[in-house]
């Protein structure tokens, strides 16, 4: 941190939020208090000069996979889930713009009365102009999660890092809510995440990041200020990235 304030470590980031993060303790819908706090933190990030893009899930409104498990056609259920992500993006856009933050919602499904169509070059231009960009409707295709959409969009806009905001402070070797002896990893490589079956992001998203050496940082968004801390390079959460040199102890992956 400089005398003038925090200095961002990344120039352009994509932040992936789960829809459930917006509903708080009520378990469904959008909690106005959480939405306002999130908008406040994102305003701070944008104020640092960071080019910020977001992908938000829709699980607080509708989960396509759960509906498909209950007998609904999977493609129809996934399209409904995509519409839920648009609702979340519009809610966050409103919260940000009430704070004076210029935003754009870009949807993978055409709905011009609500959002701009997703065009990669347009998204990059918005970021270069200092606007916060909200990517909605996933990839626009069923059978792909918003995790995969986040990885895809992060690579398309040439993001420096993919930030995965969760309710826990990183990746553990087992569920920390059920096991008191669960250990948090400081760093993992992509293959370890896949081989261990760690439920960080789906395997398609992890594989996309691996193929393009896009680092992922998994961190706790429920602690106020953590988004700023991770953007400024503070060592919080768990980093998922390329394998390090095993001959160098300082670069080994370890809990």
Image: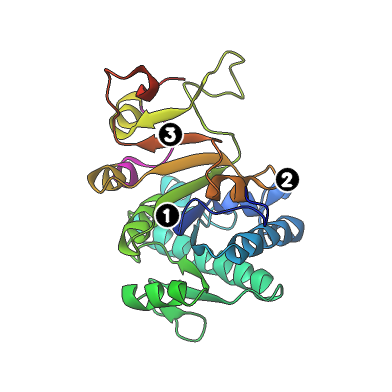
Q: Residues within 10 Å of mark 2 (few under 14, many from 20)?
A: few
Q: Position of residue 135 (x, y in %)?
A: 45, 66
Q: Earlier in the sequence, mark 2 or mark 1?
A: 2
**How many labels were placed on the picture?**
3
Q: Is residue 71 left or right of residue 206?
A: right
In front of the other: 4 or 173: 4
| Whether residue 218 is situated above or below residue 79 in the rendered picture | above
Q: Which residue corresponds to mark 2?
A: 25
In 3D space, how far apart are the residues under numbered discs 3 and 2 (Cα atoms)?
A: 22 Å
Q: Is residue 21 left or right of residue 183?
A: right
The answer to whether residue 140 is above or below residue 118 is above
Q: Quick one: label 3 or label 2, which is nearer the N terminus?
A: 2
Q: Quadrant of residue 216?
A: top left
Q: Residue at x 35, y 63 (%)?
A: 139
List the single residue furthest toward the top. 181
Span colored in magenta: 197-206
Q: Main secondary structure of the magenta part?
A: loop
Residue named by callout 3: 199
Q: Disc 3 to disc 1, how far (Cα)?
A: 14 Å
> Is residue 109 visible to the viewer in this orientation of the structure?
no
Q: Farthest residue to the right: give it.
A: 33
145 in the magenta segment? no
For image coordinates 60% across by 72% down, the residue present is 93
Q: Secondary structure at mark 1?
A: helix
* Residue beneath disc 1: 146
Residue 198 in the magenta stretch? The answer is yes
Residue 233 lies, in percent from the top left, at 52, 44
CA gap between label 2 and label 1 equals 22 Å
Contact (Cβ within 8 Å) of mark 2 with mark 1:
no
**Residues tagged 3 and 2 counted as in contact (Cβ below 8 A):** no
Regarding residue 108, the answer to whether it shows in the image is yes
């Amino acid at each position: 941190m400089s005398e003038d304030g925090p200095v961002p470590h990344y120039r352009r980031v994509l932040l992936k939020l789960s829809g459930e993060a917006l509903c708080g303790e009520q378990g469904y819908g959008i909690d106005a208090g959480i939405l306002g706090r999130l908008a406040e933190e994102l305003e701070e990030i944008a104020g640092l000069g960071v080019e910020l893009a977001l992908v938000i899930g829709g699980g607080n409104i509708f989960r396509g996979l759960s509906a498909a498990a209950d007998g609904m056609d999977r493609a129809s259920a996934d399209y409904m889930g995509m519409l839920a992500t648009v609702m979340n993006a519009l809610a966050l856009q409103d919260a940000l713009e009430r704070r004076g933050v210029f935003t754009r919602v870009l949807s993978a499904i055409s709905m011009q009365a609500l959002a701009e169509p997703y065009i990669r070059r347009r998204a990059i231009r918005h970021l270069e102009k200092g606007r916060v960009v909200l990517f909605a409707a996933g990839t626009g295709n069923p059978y792909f999660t918003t995790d995969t959409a986040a990885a895809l969009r992060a690579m398309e806009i040439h993001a420096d890092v993919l930030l995965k905001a969760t309710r826990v402070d990183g990746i553990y070797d087992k569920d920390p809510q059920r096991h008191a002896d669960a250990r948090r990893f400081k760093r993992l490589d992509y293959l370890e995440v896949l081989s261990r079956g760690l439920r960080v992001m789906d395997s398609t998203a992890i594989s996309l990041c691996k193929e393009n050496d896009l680092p992922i940082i998994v961190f706790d968004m429920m602690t106020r200020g953590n988004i700023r801390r991770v953007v400024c390079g503070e060592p919080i959460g768990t980093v998922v990235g390329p394998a390090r040199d095993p001959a160098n102890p300082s670069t080994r992956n370890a809990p």
